[in-house]
């Protein structure tokens, strides 16, 4: 039976959700102003809003598997580098996206962000990519739109109960098809000899 730490992603909180929570708190936004891609959300008709999405590829940078004999559990861990794209937008005449775009890297370097990262087994890159003005993508003068990328390192862990060597049957089969069970509880070494 598998045991995981809180969520199917096996980190405490999915990395992109942790970043969204940090930005929402530090930039004093409400939940309708933070949009995760691939979710059915309405774009606010006025005011500032942010969209976040995985911009991939996610790269595995370390992994290990260990066995804890005291609890009979197998611990599998992998560290992934997640690329997350953050876009900040506002509709004219509201220029808050242009004015507040620098708050994103400031929020991600705050003490609050460090506490959330430690709690959720994350590492947030020190510097985001350049902030790009991508307002021209929409071919309109009505949308202020800026984009940046960050890298988040996340430890994903899966802990499962594991059979030890002496808890499943072992046998040897000869070429003629005869099978001989092996008692794994008996030492194969001669005692005193």
Image (cartoon, helix red, strand yellow):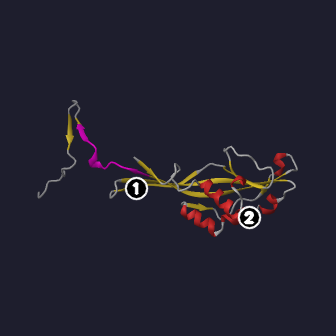
In reply to whether residue 164 is colored magenta, the answer given is yes
Q: Secondary structure at mark 2?
A: helix
Please tell me whether residue 150 belongs to the stretch shown in magenta: no
State whether residue 96 is above or below residue 163: below
Residue at 20 percent of width and 50 percent of height: 185
Task: State which mark lies toward you, 1 or 2.
Answer: 2
Task: Identify the disc placed on residue 66.
Answer: 1
- Magenta stretch in the rendered image: 159-172
Q: Is residue 173 visible?
A: yes
Going from the N terminus, do you reach mark 1 or mark 2 first?
1
From the viewer's perspective, tell me whether residue 6 is left or right of residue 100.
left
102 or 185: nearer the viewer: 102
The quarter of the displayed image where residue 149 is located: bottom right
Q: Which of the image's four quarters has the C terminus? A: bottom left
Q: Residue at x 20, y 32 (%)?
A: 178
**Residue 161's x, y, as percent?**
37, 50
x, y percent for residue 172: 23, 39
Kindly indicate the quadrant of the structure image that contains residue 107: bottom right
Residue at horizontal 32%, vertical 58%? 70
């Amino acid at each position: 039976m598998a045991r995981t730490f809180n969520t199917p992603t096996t980190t405490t909180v999915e990395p992109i959700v942790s970043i969204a929570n940090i930005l929402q708190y530090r930039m004093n936004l409400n939940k309708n102003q933070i949009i995760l891609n691939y979710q059915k959300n309405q774009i606010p008709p006025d005011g500032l809003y942010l969209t976040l999405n995985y911009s991939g590829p996610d790269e595995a940078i370390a992994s290990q598997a260990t066995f804890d004999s005291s609890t009979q559990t197998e611990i599998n861990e992998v560290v992934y580098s997640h690329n997350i794209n953050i876009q900040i937008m506002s509709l004219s005449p509201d220029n808050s996206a242009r004015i507040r775009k620098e708050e994103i890297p400031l929020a991600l370097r705050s003490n609050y962000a460090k506490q959330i990262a430690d709690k959720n087994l994350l590492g947030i890159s020190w510097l985001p990519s350049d902030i790009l003005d991508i307002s021209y993508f929409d071919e309109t003068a009505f949308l202020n739109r800026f984009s940046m990328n960050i890298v988040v390192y996340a430890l994903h862990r899966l802990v499962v109960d594991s059979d030890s060597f002496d808890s499943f049957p072992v046998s040897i089969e000869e070429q003629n098809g005869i099978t001989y069970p092996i008692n794994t509880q008996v030492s194969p070494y001669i005692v005193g000899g």
